Image (cartoon, rainbow, N blue to C red):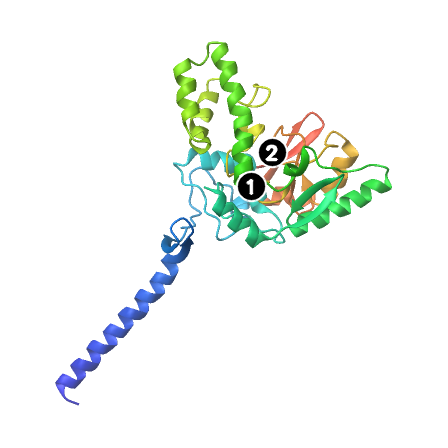
Amino acid sequence: MSFLRVLKLSVLTVFALTILLSSSSSRNVIRSRYDHSSGKPKPVVAASVSRHSRHVTNQKFLTYLRKDFALPDDSDEIGLRILSDYGAMFVVSDQIKVPPRCIFANEQEVQGFQNQATFVTTIIGGVKIELQPAAMNALLAARDEARILKLDITPRGGSEAARRSYADTVRLWYTRVSPALKYWQKRGRLSRKQVQELQKLSAADQVARVLELEKSGIFFSQDLSKSILYSIAAPGSSQHIAMVALDVSQFSNEQVRHILAKHGWFQTVYSDLPHFTYLGLPEDDLSRRGLRAVKLGSQVFWIPNIKD
């Protein structure tokens, strides 16, 4: 075989390998997503899923996070706070579709997730309730058991007791922030200028400022005595968006709480008393998934234990 022929085959081989490797890399790094605002597809860098964190070190919790879940960066204070306060829903039963990140950025992302996860609808006490199928089946089974004991399990606060949209989380956020701003300005803890600056921000942009103010005791919960995140979720972060949460009217009834737990429903947001989350697991399994039991009065909340 001539030297030129060998050289030509070598060049072609290297060229083919380069194309193959480039194509493989592209599939791993970039995927195409449709941009509804412009009507054109746009390249999106796939989420880099890292399990190395200075703030999230509990290996039990990390082990049960889904492989495609984007753990917040060490510098993402809000994301880490959401994971710490609401993160029980990320280590649920495999029957449940969980969000790929702590916070959805907009309505389009929320609708995309909810359509992919799917949900079913039923009427309870005259109220339309929408949940992921496994969560709904467990809820209906719990209601059947409760009725045998002459009890009931009903939604608290209308349809938004279950599935919520991104817009719902924004609206509910303002129901806490707006009254709190007036209250703290009246008492001289916030100046008029500070209030006006906060009011100009979008709900999503308010989150960091509100959490910073709470460090100095200026709380934004409904009763103004605790963090806003124990009263209402930051926009785009609610477990109700994931369709695995239900606000229950009979939350103070110990028998009802026991029945719900038997069917995989637990309280997972500290001091949010009516709020229950479908984990789809027996209670004995919760600590093995990196959750810890925190008592408040007679009620038990299963909270992520993100640090060893």
**Residue 19 vertical placement versus 87 (above, below):** below
Q: Please name the amino acid that badge 2 sits on.
A: Val
Comparing 141 with 116, the one in front is 116
Classed neighbour count for the residue bearing mark 1: other residues with Cα under 10 Å, few (<14), some (14–19), many (≥20): many
Residue 245 - label: none
Mark 1: secondary structure:
loop
Q: Decide if residue 63 is in sight here.
A: no
Please give left or right for residue 202 compared with residue 11 in the image: right
Q: Which residue is mark 1?
A: 165
**Residue 164 vertical placement versus 112 (above, below):** above
Mark 2: secondary structure:
loop
Q: Are marks 1 and 2 in contact (CB under 8 Å)?
A: no
Q: Position of residue 187 (x, y in %)?
A: 50, 9
Comparing 267 with 55, the one in front is 267
Q: Decide if residue 49 is in sight here.
A: yes
Label 1, label 2: how many angstroms apart (C-alpha)? 19 Å
N-terminal of the pair, mark 1 or mark 2, is 1
State the residue at coordinates (38%, 62%): 27
Q: Please name the amino acid that badge 1 sits on.
A: Ser
Q: Position of residue 136 (x, y in %)?
A: 69, 48
Q: Position of residue 125 (x, y in %)?
A: 76, 39
**Residue 57 vertical placement versus 207 (above, below):** below
Q: Position of residue 74 (x, y in %)?
A: 40, 38
Residue 269 - label: 2
Comparing 240 with 84, the one in front is 240
State the residue at coordinates (57%, 42%): 241
State the residue at coordinates (76%, 44%): 142
